[in-house]
Image (spheres, rainbow, N blue to C red):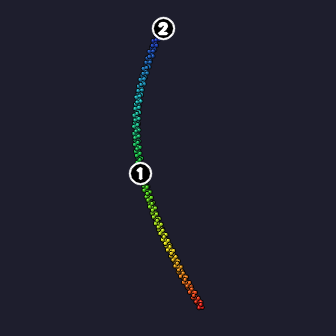
Amino acid sequence: ASEQQLQEMAAAKKASEQQLQEMAAAKKASEQQLQEMAAAKKASEQQLQEEVQKQAASLAAVRDEAAQALSAAESRAEQQKQEDLRKAAESLAAAQSEADAHRANLTAALEALEFAKLEKQEVLRKASEELSAANEESKLRQEKTVEKVAADIASAQAEASEKIAALEAAAESTAQELAARTSEL
C-alpha cells in the first residue's frame, strides 16, 4: 500500500510537473504574445505618428493654399473695389457734368424767358402809349370834327336865315308890288 501511495505521489508529481511545464509554456506563449502586442502597439503608434505628421503636413499645405487663395481673393476684391470706385467716380463725374449742362441750359432758358418777358412788357408799354396817343389824337380829331360840323351847321343856319330873310324881303316886295298894281287897277 505504501508503494502504491508512492507510485500515486510520483504520478501526481509527474502530473504536477507536466502541469507546471504546460503553465510555463503558456506563460512563455503569453509573454511572446505580449511582446508581439507591444511590437504591434509600437508599430501602430509609429504608423499613427506618421499619419498625424502626414495629416499635419497636409493641413499645413491646405492652410497655405487657403491663405494664398484668400490673399488672391482679397487682391481681386480690392482690384474690383478700386475698379468699381473708379467707375462710380466716372459715372458721378458724368452725371455732374450732365447736371451742370442742364443747369446751364435752364439758366439760359430762364434768362431768355426773363428777356422775353421784359421785351413783351416793353412792347406792351409802347403799344399802350401808342394806343393812348392814338386815342388822344382820335379824340382831338373827333373834337375838331364836331367843332367843324357845328361851325358848318351854324354857317348853314346863318346862310339859311339870310336866304329866308331875303326870301321874306322878296315876298314882301312882291306883295307890295302886287298891292301897288292892284291899287292901280
The percent coordinates of residue 167 (x first, y second) are 55, 83
> Which residue does the image show at 52% across and 76% down from the upper left?
150
Query: Mark 2 or 1 closer to N-term?
Result: 2
Q: Is residue 21 above or below residue 94?
A: above
Picture mark count: 2
Q: Kindly identify which residue carries mark 2.
A: 1
Q: Nearer the viewer, mark 2 or mark 1?
A: 1
> Which residue does the image show at 48% across and 71% down from the upper left?
137
Residue ranking furthest to the bottom: 184
The percent coordinates of residue 35 (x first, y second) are 41, 23
**Which of 51 and 77 lies nearest the eye of the viewer?**
77
Q: Is residue 119 above or below residue 17?
A: below
Tell me the kind of residue under disc 1.
Answer: Ala
> Which residue does the image show at 39% across and 39% down from the upper left?
68
- Mark 1 packing: few (<14 Cα in 10 Å), some, or many (20+)? few
Tell me the kind of residue under disc 2.
Answer: Ala
Q: CA distance from mark 2 to mark 1?
A: 131 Å
**Which of 34 and 107 lies nearest the eye of the viewer?**
107
Q: Kindly identify which residue carries mark 1.
A: 93
Q: Quadrant of residue 18?
A: top left
- Mark 2 packing: few (<14 Cα in 10 Å), some, or many (20+)? few
The percent coordinates of residue 181 (x first, y second) are 58, 90
Q: Report helix, strand or loop for mark 1.
A: helix
Q: Report helix, strand or loop for mark 2.
A: loop
- Contact, mark 2 vs mark 1 (Cβ under 8 Å): no
Q: Quadrant of the C terminus?
A: bottom right
The percent coordinates of residue 129 (x first, y second) are 47, 67
Q: Is residue 8 above or below residue 181?
A: above
Q: Is residue 105 above or below residue 28?
A: below
Q: Quadrant of residue 23?
A: top left
Locate residue 172 relative to residue 45 in the image: left or right. Answer: right
